[in-house]
Image (cartoon, rainbow, N blue to C red):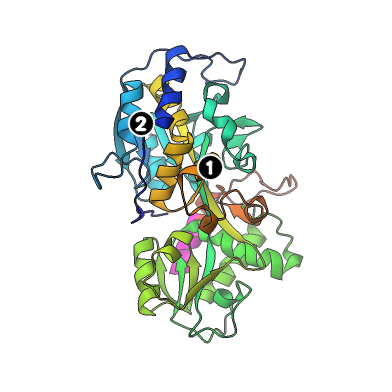
Amino acid sequence: MMKAKSIKATGLGFLAAASLIALTACGTSSGGSSAGMLEKLGDNEGQVNILAWPGYVEDGTNDPTVDWVTPFTEATGCKVNAKTYGTSDEAVSLMKTGEYDVVAASGDATLRLIAGGDVAPVNTDLIPNYAGIYDFLKNKQWNSVDGVSYGIPHGYGANLLAYNSDVVSPAPTSWDLVFAADSPYKGKISAYDSPIYIADAALYLMNTKPELGITNPYSLDETQLAAAVELLKAQRVNVGEYWSDYLKAISALDAGDTVATTTWQVIMNYLAQPTAVKAILPDEGATGWSDTWMVASAAKNVNCAYAWLDYIASPEANAAATGWFGEAPSSAAACDFREDCDAFNAGDEVFANKLWYWTTPTAKCLDGRTDVTCTDYAAWTAAWQEIKG
């Protein structure tokens, strides 16, 4: 996935930093016994090395009014050294260098990081602001294993269906708009450029071909994956462009080069106005993402890493970071510092439960099946290359 920072700026004060001062001054203990899990906080090391999507760690360099890093450093003494990455594959590779203490990872990377031993279980008892995070984002397949948390939810969003209402008629209610082989909009359809997009096809098939037995779009055996590949190959004929940079998706929708596509709410928010482009959550539901802050298993600055996880989960800091990027925050309290939560369906559990958040496909079936072997991310990557040709 390629994420780029939002155009929208969100201010940040120092309220979130106040709770951090209390946290880093005293520390707490935990009875957690998971291997590699920190049990007690110590003194902050003076710095933290963070790997993140663009727009997640802003210190005023890109926009002097957008800075949630400085309050953190002033409160904790932890200097932030940040590096951005462009895709989940890049993040997984960079984490193997051992140079980073913290990573902001999407669900198509998290389980790979866990399986590779690159990240450690997170002791949520040491993170006071964890309590305020929406329960529907906690202890999920993409951020925990066997009930053990491996990170702190950051922000989330849906992969919606966008369409140009001046061109597309009648108004769609289904993903059939982008998957129909005989589409009248040939060349005007675009699709997200990533192996994880296979899950979008699987979700569609889960609803339209129940005989395939798909119950989780990230848990596909070989037959189910082949069906998704077949659908996406048929779609390929109609696709005018695959996009990974959402700024390019905005341009294509504005220009009318794209009339139907998977989209994000942030894309809709920054289309030129007035616009005929509308977005819906189709009847089948949708895939989506819920990003996670994770701590490296070999973190050299683990205390500052925990300080960052608590800070970025605090209402004001989380509001600033998710608002700047353009996604729903991870807590209801964060909406006290944003005016656009309704646009992102923040906190709407009914809406959230219609989403299948990006989760790394693994050979162990995520849907609970034990009589078959499921296809893993490597198989999906090979399939995506085959689909695009």
Location of mark 1 (residue): 330
Asked if the residue under mark 2 is in contact with the one under mark 1, i.e. CB atoms within 8 Å, the reply is: no
Quadrant into which the N terminus falls: bottom left
Q: Is residue 94 left or right of residue 277?
A: left
Kindly indicate the quadrant of the structure image that contains residue 45: top left
The foreground one among 303 and 337 is: 337
Does the magenta portion include 193?
no
The numbered disc on residue 100 is: 2
Residue 246 lies, with reference to residue 82, above or below; the image says below
Residue 220 lies, with reference to residue 78, above or below; the image says below
Other residues around mark 1 within 10 Å, as few (<14) / some (14–19) / many (≥20): many
**What percent of the width, then of the height, locates residue 298?**
41, 24
Q: Is residue 118 visible from the viewing direction of this image?
A: no
The numbered disc on residue 263 is: none
**What percent of the width, then of the height, locates residue 315?**
48, 37
Q: Is residue 34 left or right of residue 97?
A: right
In the image, what residue occupies the spot 67% across and 68% down?
Answer: 283
In the image, what residue occupies the spot 56% across and 20% down?
Answer: 35
**What percent of the width, then of the height, locates residue 162?**
51, 71
User: Which marked residue is nearer to the observer: mark 1 or mark 2?
Assistant: 1
Q: Is residue 261 left or right of residue 324?
A: right
Q: Main secondary structure of the magenta part?
A: helix
Which element type, helix, strand or loop, lies under badge 2?
loop
In the image, what residue occupies the spot 28% across and 38% down?
Answer: 59
In the image, what residue occupies the spot 50% across and 67% down?
Answer: 262
Q: Is residue 273 left or right of residue 383?
A: left
Chain-order first, disc 1 or disc 2: 2
For the record, the magenta segment spans: 381-389
Q: Is residue 139 visible from the viewing direction of this image?
A: yes
Residue 14 lies, with reference to residue 257, above or below; the image says above
The foreground one among 264 and 103 is: 264
